[in-house]
Image (cartoon, rainbow, N blue to C red):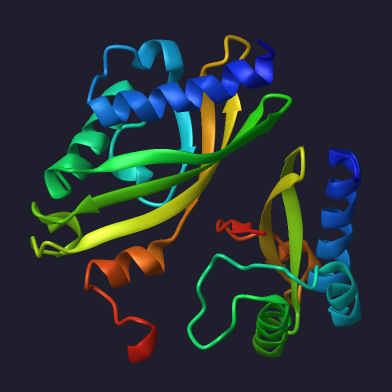
Amino acid sequence: MPTPEQNKETMRRFYDEVFNKKNLDHARETISDDFVEHEEFPGIPPDKEGAIKIFEMIFGGTPDMSAEVLDMVASGDRVAARAAPTRAGSCPARRRPTSRTAWS
Amino acid sequence: MSNVERNIDMVRRLEDAYNRRDYSQLGELIRDDLIAHTPGSEQVPQNHEGLAANNENAYSAFPDKRTEVLDAFGEGDRVVTRIRNTGTNTGGLPWLGITANDAKIDMEWIQISRHDEDGKIAETWTQMEVPKLMQQLGAMPGPEGM
């Protein structure tokens, strides 16, 4: 069993590889085959395949999107991450997180 | 009891107080200068009075409202809780333009709370199943209508 610290590291790397580098192979390697998504997306199965599909949709719509992890809490086999999307603009100084938070 | 267990207990006791509509212990559980990062929370004062008013507003819409803590864990000064909220809209939600329609709601939210040195809730970040809630209230088409 990985420790909570190891699980946090997995999560941190997932955000970096998948959200920031758009590395869907990393998503396929890291998401468990029996993954269950409890957030309903109409027309998308609540499993690993559906999760990859959602990433493809997000990246198709906002290819310059990236995410910043703002907080992480871990215990046992659970990790909660609070993250905000960051969108690169033409001026790097204007890059900043939006006010919305996202859950993973 | 570790600090994390004490902090988790604070969140459970707060939900219990909201379910009993008993606001006498809010001062022991949550700081009066709470910072709540929840959409809509800026509409009521962020203090004990505002929290009680918020809960009473929810009861005016859903007189049978209940919350249940389904999952709770913590680390350091943080607690994460997943909370289920059920109720029947027999009172209406005029602030959203929704009239009483006997719609049953059953949705969840996940909250991260930061606790002060006494264990009191000092700051919260919440994500709710808003699309599901709006569908259940009949204010938004369901999956088959989208």
**Is residue B13 depicted above or below B131 in this figure?**
above
Using the rendered view, name the quadrant where residue A31 is placed. Answer: bottom right
Please name whichever residue, B36 or A12, is drawn nearer the observer in this view of the structure: A12
A82, A86: nearer the viewer: A82
- For the N terminus of chain B, which image quadrant? top right
Residue closest to the eye, B72 or B140? B72
| Total numbered labels | 0
Quadrant of res A59: bottom right
- Against B19, residue A50 (above or below) is below
Q: Residue at x 28, y 31 (%)?
A: B19
Of the 4 image quadrants, the one containing the C terminus of chain B is bottom left
Left or right relative to B31: residue A86: right
Nearer-the-camera pick, B86 or A58: B86
Q: Residue at x 18, y 43 (%)?
A: B64
Q: Where is residue A101 in the image (x, y as percent from the top left)?
A: 59, 56
Q: Where is residue A79 in the image (x, y as percent from the top left)?
A: 73, 47
In the rendered image of this protein, does residue B27 appear above or below residue A34? above
Residue at 79 percent of width and 73 percent of height: A33
Q: Position of residue A23 (x, y in %)?
A: 88, 78
Vertical order, B6 against A41 (above or below)? above
Q: Is residue B70 visible in this depiction of the protein?
A: yes
Q: Position of residue B97 (x, y in %)?
A: 14, 64
Instruction: Answer yes or no: is residue B146 visible.
Output: no
